[in-house]
Image (cartoon, helix red, strand yellow):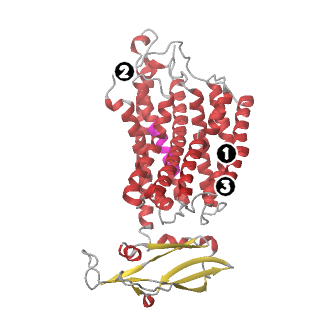
Amino acid sequence: TKFKDAIHNSYFFEMFVEDLPMWGYVGDVSDEDVLLGEVEGSKTYLFPHLHFKLGTNEGNIVSATVTTDSDRRVDITDTNKPTEVQFSYSVDWVWEKHLPWKYRMTRYHDSRFLPSSFEIHWLSIINSFVLVLLLTAFLTIILMRVLKNDFSRYMELDEETMEEEESGWKLIHGDVFRFPENSSLFCAAVGTGLQLMLCTFGVLILALTGAVSTTRRGSILAGCIVVYCITSFISGYASTNLYLKMNGKAWTRCVLLAATLFPLPVAAVFMIVNTIALGHGSTSALPFGTIFTLTFLYACISVPLCVFGGSMAKNYGKHDFNAPTRTTKVAREIPTEVPWYRGRPFQMIIAGFLPFSAIYIELHYIFASMWGHQIYTLFGILLFAFILLVIVSSFITVALLYFQLAREDHRWWWATFINGGMTGVFIYVYSVFYYYHRSGMSGLLQSSFYFGYMAAVSFGFFLMLGSAGFYMSLAFVKHIYGRIKCD
């Protein structure tokens, strides 16, 4: 009965030989009505024989396909009658003269078994690039014109009328460099985001150069773990250096936050998911040896490098913030009556939606690769899409920062970080849509894996893009306030 249900629901199997996937249908239905499905006279057949065709080149398996034999099919229409089925397989070995091992995945680009189109993929990338180009050009032109007018207006004011004419973002020049609350947590988040961003760039470059195998299952994840541990020095250095520039005293607390801000939530998700997998007897549960290895890498490589980076920043880093304006002792009151479209909730939605719209289609392919049966090999396109995402997120954050400063709100530190990272929130929201409308997953095991690890990935994107948005905003604020003359 289960075989018959699987055949009527178009189930297919997936097998791997040397990390090369193969697909085939479980069975077939003859004389089936298109609208009504199974009718009287229709037959359901099971394919018990599989024929494998494996191609070799210089002693390596470079191709693998599987076909079913319709002549050996078994009629299982009547599930009430016991049917004896003998499963078998056969193998043909062929020489693939023109297919080197390093190009063995290229044939999957045009696979017609999977519901994907290589041409549509390229079209989506071009569409995203044009969208990002137009968006960044539009924001650049608008900001340059607005800032040029602001600079001209401020420069033309004489000293006698300065106090009366000052308004907008120049009015808060004495508060804009007032350091944020919870500065240690803020600096740790910025440093961790910078580390994750450089880690992502590193893994994508390693995948492009072939240093990390993109065809061997688990190699990309292993590469991410190793590169993350090595780049922990960046997190410790960037976090501590920024914290000391903010006149922070407890730099060790900042380093510990930087070392645990991302790994601890990921470890919590892993413990919950792995426990559920063990309870279900799933082979996806990691064994104790692998868990011990991951713990060793974190405790003996990642944490020491993070602490070493913080120590280097304390002893050799430049601790002068170099603010172009002096900060007043008393904070200026922030206007509370602002239109809804200039408020924080609306700006957060805009900050996440626009960058997400630029990567939406590419994100679908990545999800299909991570959680479905499709193969992702276009890491050059993925690197390009990631660069576009960082650029557009940074530009949107700067544009929203200008509007925030123009309404005389000087609390921009956390605002720019959150605005930059809002794309991570949109990615998680999209993952919920994908789960219910695209994935076909169900049950506690699959749900826990999907939502748990997608929460970790989305949190990583939140930190990465938030850090990129903050650094771009910091350069923008220093530039515009360094161009004007303040009393």
Residue bearing mark 1:
231
Q: Say whether disc 3 or disc 2 marks the residue closer to the N-terminus.
A: 3
Image quadrant where residue 165 sits:
top left
Residue in the image at 48% along x and 54% along y: 450
Residue plotted at (53% across, 21% down):
178
364 or 17, nearer to the observer: 17
Name the residue type under label 3: Phe
Q: Is residue 298 above or below residue 186?
A: below
Give the side of residue 278 with respect to residue 250, left or right: left
Residue 36: x, y in percent? 24, 75
Residue denoted by label 2? 336
> Mark 1 and mark 2: span between their CA atoms?
42 Å
**Which portion, as a residue range, is magenta?**
386-397
- The answer to whether residue 458 is visible is yes
How crowded is the residue under tag 1: few (<14 C-alpha within 10 Å), some, or many (20+)?
A: many
Q: Is residue 391 magenta?
A: yes
Q: Quadrant of the N terminus?
A: bottom left
Nearest-to-viewer mark from 1 and 3: 3
The label on residue 472 is none
Q: Amino acid at mark 1?
A: Thr
Q: CA distance from mark 3 to mark 2?
A: 55 Å
